[in-house]
Image (cartoon, helix red, strand yellow):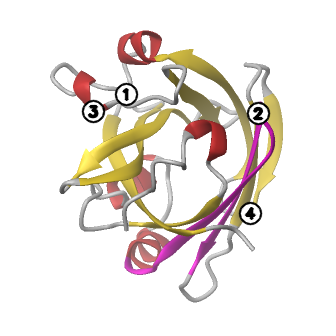
Amino acid sequence: MAAPSTVTLQSLSGKYTLNKACSDDFSKVLALQGVNALVRKAATAASIHLTITQPSPNEIKMAQSVTAGKIPGTTEDYTLDWEWRSNEDSFFGTIEGRSRWVSVDEGQKSGIVTQGEEEWIEGDSEGKLVQAEGKKPDGEWQAAHLWGFEMVDGERRHTRRVQVKNTKGEELRVRMVYDYIGESA
């Protein structure tokens, strides 16, 4: 379902579902991050749901749930000040992350999107995107995200461009497309 024009990065609160038909295959990213094949298969077969709240303009809280077996959900807190913070993730263990607002131009120069993909980005009303980075403290993998909106199959959708690298020198870029389900309860 399309995100209404009232839903922006400044007002992202709501419920979303990963649209697998419009998204790139995320199982390859999980493999690059060292997730075993059985868990990858279950995770990619499941529905992935996000509940996002924004307690303030510079805070985003995201609860992710998976409708499959014993795969745990995760909760992520993003404080948009570019300071590294540690979080205990039920899926990956200890991870470190940081996030901030960036201009569309900065986002396009970040290396997260490749040549020819630059026009996908629709920032908020001030022309900003959310940039986030995460990594395992041991350096096993690192990920960079850009969040925005784009037209997908003729509908405005919340999207994330993700670039993941690991210590083996492997690198992937994927697009995740989310359907807007409605307001958070």
Q: Earlier in the sequence, mark 4 or mark 2?
A: 2
State how far apart marks 3 and 1 are (Cα). Answer: 27 Å
Q: Nearer the viewer, residue 166 or 76?
A: 76
Q: Nearer the viewer, residue 56 or 32?
A: 56
* Residue at numbered disc 1: 169
Q: Farthest front residue?
A: 6
* Residue at numbered disc 4: 90
* Residue at numbered disc 2: 57
* Residue at numbered disc 3: 120
Q: Farthest bottom residue?
A: 69
The image shows residue 27, relative to residue 171, as above or below, that is below
2 and 3 marks in contact (CB < 8 Å): no
Which SS class for mark 3?
A: helix
The answer to which quarter of the image holds residue 169 is: top left
Which SS class for mark 1?
A: loop
Q: Earlier in the sequence, mark 3 or mark 1?
A: 3
Task: Specify the segment rendered in magenta.
Answer: 45-66
Residue drawn where x is 25% and y is 60% of the image: 22
Judged by its main secondary structure, the magenta piece is strand
Q: Earlier in the sequence, mark 1 or mark 4?
A: 4
Q: Earlier in the sequence, mark 3 or mark 4?
A: 4
Q: Earlier in the sequence, mark 2 or mark 3?
A: 2
The answer to which quarter of the image holds residue 53 is: bottom right
Left or right of 98: which side holds 116? left
Q: Is residue 117 magenta?
A: no
State how far apart marks 1 and 2 are (Cα). Answer: 36 Å
